[in-house]
Amino acid sequence: MSRKTKSGQEKKAKTPEKREFRYAMMAAFPGHGHGDLAGAYPAVCLGMILHTPGTEPGPAALRAIQPAFERGLVKDLFCADRGITQAKPHNLHLQLLKLGLNAVKHYNDDKVDRQGEFRGMQLIGGEFYCPLMPTSLVTAGATYIDSRTDEDRAHALNLIQSRKDYQAKIKEYGPAGDQRRQCPALGPHATVTCYRRPQPRPSTVVDLDAPTVRTPAALPTIPRPKRDTPVYPDICRGKSITVPGTVLAKWRQKYPLFTPLWQEAWSGLRSQNEGGNGNLKKSALDSIDNPQLRLPHGRVAQTLLNAVIIFVANLRAIRRFLRDQGIQPRKASTQSAATQAGDPSDPPPAPLPTEQVEPPPRE
């Protein structure tokens, strides 16, 4: 007999849940963050690793780029989608610093402006700025995202460019990503004037017709707020402070967010990445996401089958690139039929080169 509940209804048998075992693939593609060089080579897959979805993406990304990095094909810049910012710093971001790679990052909408603070400096868009930077400049990232017209976007980009005057100056680079920073109002090359850094300033005649001439009188001035803190932070009191590379490594990047250099690097690298992914997912060709091409189960079997599919896709990408560039494949030279292999007059065959010819570095 079936067991009844207090309400008198029979307890329904639980239907077995259907479980699916899936793998996520992390693939590495070449890219270039500087203008026209982004299309100077085919978008082939340089490395691949299968991992469990939802797990830590940092180690998977490092294993994917490891073969290309060991061959000198990865240099300077590393770019991934927004999900890579969820990786733990010691698993990815600090490891990239040890390899000498600078990450080009994008953030979620709630992190596009302020990502943290260190000894008074505020990290905005991946760069450290003065703690008294105007609010309109602090929120310029959100203004750019929320803009709907070209005029609004241009205004937001001008605000983002104006942040440069308030950027904490880098005095010295140290090991493991360490940096020695200085207040932007200090030194002979100060970019702002601040009441917290009083300096004698002679009167100067400012030429309004030449706004590019930055005299001390023409620098942006930080006004005193109505409610000022009695104790100033370290960046406002000391001559310089050292920022360890481990501080906010998850958010820091070489090019501040939405600046022209960042947009050039991000658009170039991401377009190459998406183009490579598109080549692997073409249904008419390789279709790496088609499970019918990978019937055997298991991570090892799936890895081997994906490796074969990627090899064929890379070969097609290289041939397509050569065809589009008008490059003819080199034909193997053959000996003349009149010359015999055993003729003593034949010159000895040239030895094979022992040095490994390394291709030019890619970003």
Image: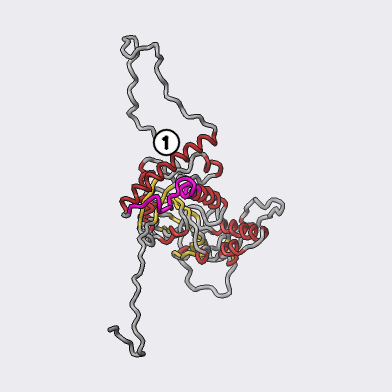
Q: Is residue 89 above or below residue 9?
A: above
Query: For this rendering, which residue is in front, 23 or 188?
Result: 23
Q: Residue at x 66, y 58 (%)?
A: 150
Q: Is residue 219 visible?
A: no
Magenta span contains residue 318: no
Q: Residue at x 33, y 52 (%)?
A: 296
Query: For this rendering, which residue is in front, 213 or 101?
Result: 101
Q: Which residues are magenta?
A: 275-296
Query: For this rendering, which residue is in front, 60 or 15?
Result: 15
Q: Residue furthest front?
A: 1
Q: Secondary structure at mark 1?
A: loop
Where in the figure is residue 36, as x and y percent of width and height?
Answer: 56, 42
Where in the figure is residue 50, as x and y percent of width and height?
Answer: 36, 53
Q: How is the image coloured?
A: secondary structure
Give left or right: position of 301 versus 359.
left
Where in the figure is residue 183, as x and y percent of width and height?
Answer: 50, 59
Q: Is residue 5 above or below residue 206?
A: below
In the picture, the quarter occupied by the N terminus is: bottom left
Residue receiving disc 1:
359
Query: For this rendering, which residue is in front, 137 or 209?
Result: 137
Magenta span contains residue 286: yes
- Mark 1: give few (<14), some (14-19) or many (20+) Cα within 10 Å: few
| Mark 1: amino acid | Pro
Q: Residue at x 33, y 90 (%)?
A: 6
Where in the figure is residue 116, as x and y percent of width and height?
Answer: 46, 65
The image quarter in which residue 60 lies: bottom left
Q: Residue furthest left?
A: 1
